[in-house]
Image (cartoon, rainbow, N blue to C red):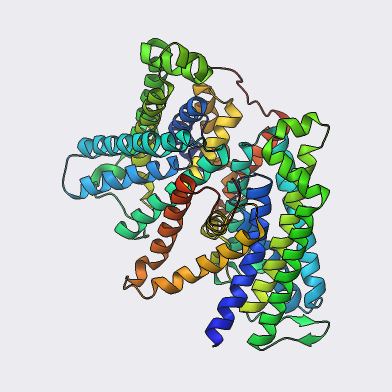
Amino acid sequence: MDFLLSYLALAEIYVLLGLSTNLLVGIAGIFSVSQAAVFGVGAYIVAQSLMHGVMGFVPAVLVAAVACIVLNILVTLPSLRVSGDYFVVTSFGIQLLATAVFINWTEGTGGANGLPGIPPPDIFGYALETNEQLLMLTTAAVVLGCLVFWLTMHAPFGRLLRAIREDELAVAAAGKGVLRAKVSAAALAGAFAGSAGGLYATFLSFIDPVSFDLDASILLLTMVVVGGARTLPGSILGPFLLLALPQLLTFIDIPTTIAASARQFIYGVLLIAFMLFRPQGIVGEKL
Amino acid sequence: MLAVQLLINGLVTGAALGLVAISFSLIYATTKLFHVAHAGVYTLAGYVAWSLSTRGLPDIVALLGAVAAAVVVGALIQGVLYAELGRRRATHLVVLIASLGMLAVMQNTISAVYSPNILQFPVPWRSNLVSVAGVPVTVTHLLTVAVSLSAYAGTMWFFHRTILGKQIRAVASNPFLAEITRLRPQRVYVIVVAIGSAIVALPGVLVPLDLGLQPFSGINPLLTATIAMIAGGIGSITGSFVLAVGIAVLQNLSLLFIPGEWSIGITFGIFVVFMLFRPTGLFPAGR
């Protein structure tokens, strides 16, 4: 039962990340392999704040969200101003740089050993310790996240983003700020990733650089691609399906030494297969 | 003396990186696709050479075998995967995600087959020292520089003096016009990716000969080479080669002041500077 609860809570955290990646890749149309890095920044900020008793869980998550918003704006603004393809370089660069920081800045991140013993989340002083309480917290966060996503997509801003995906040139000709809209979408994506990081760190009570590396970013991209780009159901379905995959793999008898490679191999195959035969994903719209 | 040694290391690394940059630049300038899976071709070449070499085949056969394998895989990626995506009118983003999937498939297949650990080439002569103008240099380093300079000269000759090279440049500058004049861009794309894969196989073998093989080591050189390509001016063979050498020298000399694990930061810093001040590169429109 505990196993099911932790699967649900973890999947819900990844739904927030799926929303984040979907905003960037599906809706703004910006290729990204650095969402795990942003996720990691959020996780480390919340972990350090709670471990040193600087502030409670709620303000720490807010600080993490703001930090990730700023980070995503700084990352997207210069490269989008130049050319869309330059963002591929920025994205890989940010991810590799972040991994280097997570591994080598030992005082801040605990290095490759990670940060153990992160205290449980609290709601204004009331600590949430059992799995049921944690699941309630992540569920509340996901409901809030989905609501924000839905409202954004149905607001004028969301229509502008859709229009940009249909015909960027026409939108620019109509006098709308394309760059501004894309950067705003990236900023919102940062807020989602930062809060997801805070939930992840406190839920697992341990974080290390492996959770936030390039492979993790590819996993996030696979979730969006499989679930479906640009829609709320797609962002929810992808994480639940792909987090069940490692559990399914344990039923097949493969040596543990190649288990990680086998998993990443399957993500790669899924990316290629969906791009070839169903680029809109299971319940998504045209990518 | 340390500075001299670092300068030499920089020049050697730069020569190898220059070939990665040339190969990527050729592919990007012609097909307009961000061929991320190129990093997988680079890695694969090293492992093929290692396999042939450990089976006791002569060194030159191992190198040629690696080049042949890279050509076949590169041509298949373009001729089957990208061509099919093109027929399905896939957007740029879709092709990019498929390419990333291909990279994940290649890297993880290699990791599962050969283990993720570092493998060294069973070649006794690789660390023999020779004296060049009084400075001791390993045979591998000397070979890397010699091969890189010849490959650079060969590429320049091919693209400016042969009919096929001129046809490729014609397709690169205007695929629509090339189609009208019956140059068949799709066929030319396969040829270009095959040539690019052959070129990238050389550093793919020579760099691991010096430093050892690792399945996930392709992304870093590809990213640095892409930065060199952008900084050198997209489409300029000389520009990307020179900038790759420049970046590698800067990276190595920076070791005098900054520890090696932050070198990705230096590379990335160079990219940001170029993006802000000279986004068209040092040698723009040098087709």
| Image quadrant assignment for residue B139 | top left
Q: Is residue B258 left or right of residue B81?
A: right
- In this rendering, would B196 be left or right of A216? left
Residue sticking out furthest to the left: B56
- A112 left or right of B38 in image: right
Inspect this view and state whether residue B246 appears: no
Establish if B46 lies above or below A251.
Answer: above
Residue visible at 61% across and 62% down in the picture: A102
* Quarter of the rendering containing residue B45: top left
Q: Residue at x 22, y 46 (%)?
A: B53
Q: Is residue A60 above or below residue A161?
A: below
Which is more toward the observer, B250 or A83? A83
Residue at left offset 82%, top offset 36% = A176
Q: Position of residue A80 (x, y in %)?
A: 70, 38
- The location of residue B66, given as percent across then percent down, is 28, 39
Residue B264 visible? The answer is yes
Q: Nearer the viewer, residue B22 or A128?
A: A128
Judge whether B168 appears above or below A32 on screen.
Answer: above
Which residue is drawn at the image coordinates 77% and 38% (left, top)?
Answer: A178
Q: Tally the numbered discs.
A: 0
Q: From the top left corner, tell me how far across and down residue A40 is, in percent.
A: 64, 63
Which picture quadrant has residue A42?
bottom right
Q: Whole-percent x and y of residue A230?
A: 65, 52
